[in-house]
């Protein structure tokens, strides 16, 4: 990723929870997990539902969102393969604070709360990493609120496309030019703008040869130009 844009300030920390030192803990978690295929549109959990476990994405993508008083989705985060969702509620002992829905066919493991907490209690290394990840996620949310509250839609869209490009790169590293494959509604709800505004600015980005599109797919043609468009300092 272009060195002028700090992608790590926009990504949660759960992919970094496991490596060679904590691989055994991941195996322990998945050994008792219930793994299945979830079609696009399937819901893993809903806001205010009792948190009885966490979810691990082997492949696919999941959006975490809240619904406002006008029944409009406000997407908080999009998780990719290798990430966990639902663990904040389990750790706090509260209900799920948002809804998690699959946005493309995915393979997901459900890990029961008791199994997760038991492994966490037995591994100081994992507990330390999780604490670090949660601290980082707080900084990500604070950064997102600060930037998206004060910036125009054009800049927010540019930032969102840069972040999504990095996620899709991680999902399929064999592709030199990965396509962002997100519906215009989801993209608009992630940017925090109307669908019409997002479509209009995508057309401007195409005219400026920053991107190209085919159907709902978006390819980044000029990453440096998009970083400049984001006006991120």
Image: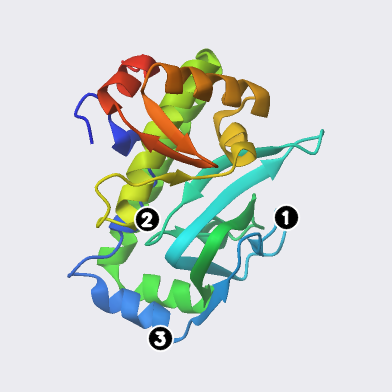
Q: Quadrant of the C terminus?
A: top left
First in residue order: circle 1 vs circle 3: 3
Image position of 84 with respect to 223: above or below: below
**CB contact under 8 Å: marks 2 and 3:** no
Query: How far across and down, in percent of the image, does residue 12 sit?
Result: 39, 46
- 107, 127: nearer the viewer: 107
* Residue annotated with mark 1: 48
First in residue order: circle 1 vs circle 2: 2
* Residue annotated with mark 3: 31
Point 36% across, 24% down: residue: 210
* Secondary structure state at the residue bearing disc 1: loop
Image position of 229 with respect to 116: above or below: above
Point 37% across, 49% down: residue: 168
How far is mark 1 from mark 3, CA to CA? 28 Å
* Residue annotated with mark 2: 14
Can the viewer see residue 51 in this picture? yes
- 17, 80: nearer the viewer: 80
First in residue order: circle 2 vs circle 3: 2
Label 3 neighbour load within 10 Å: few <14, some 14-19, many 20+: few
């Amino acid at each position: 990723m272009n060195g002028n844009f700090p992608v790590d300030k926009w990504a949660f920390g759960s992919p970094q929870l496991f490596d060679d030192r904590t691989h055994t803990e991941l195996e322990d978690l998945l050994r008792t997990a219930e793994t299945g295929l979830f079609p696009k549109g399937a819901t893993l959990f809903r806001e205010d539902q009792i948190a009885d476990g966490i979810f691990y994405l082997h492949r696919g993508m999941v959006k975490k969102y809240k619904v406002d008083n006008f029944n409009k989705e406000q997407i908080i985060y999009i998780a990719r393969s290798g990430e966990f969702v639902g663990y904040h509620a389990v750790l706090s002992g509260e209900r799920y604070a948002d809804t998690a829905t699959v946005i493309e066919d995915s393979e997901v493991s459900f890990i029961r709360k008791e199994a997760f907490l038991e492994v966490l209690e037995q591994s100081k290394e994992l507990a330390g990493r999780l604490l670090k990840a949660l601290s980082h996620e707080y900084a990500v949310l604070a950064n997102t609120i600060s930037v998206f509250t004060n910036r125009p839609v054009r800049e927010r869209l540019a930032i969102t496309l840069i972040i999504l490009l990095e996620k899709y790169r991680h999902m399929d590293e064999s592709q030199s030019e990965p396509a962002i494959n997100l519906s215009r509604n989801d993209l608009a709800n992630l940017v925090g703008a109307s669908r019409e505004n997002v479509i209009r600015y995508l057309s401007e980005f195409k005219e400026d040869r920053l991107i190209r599109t085919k159907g709902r797919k978006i390819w980044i043609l000029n990453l440096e130009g998009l970083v400049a468009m984001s006006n991120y300092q």
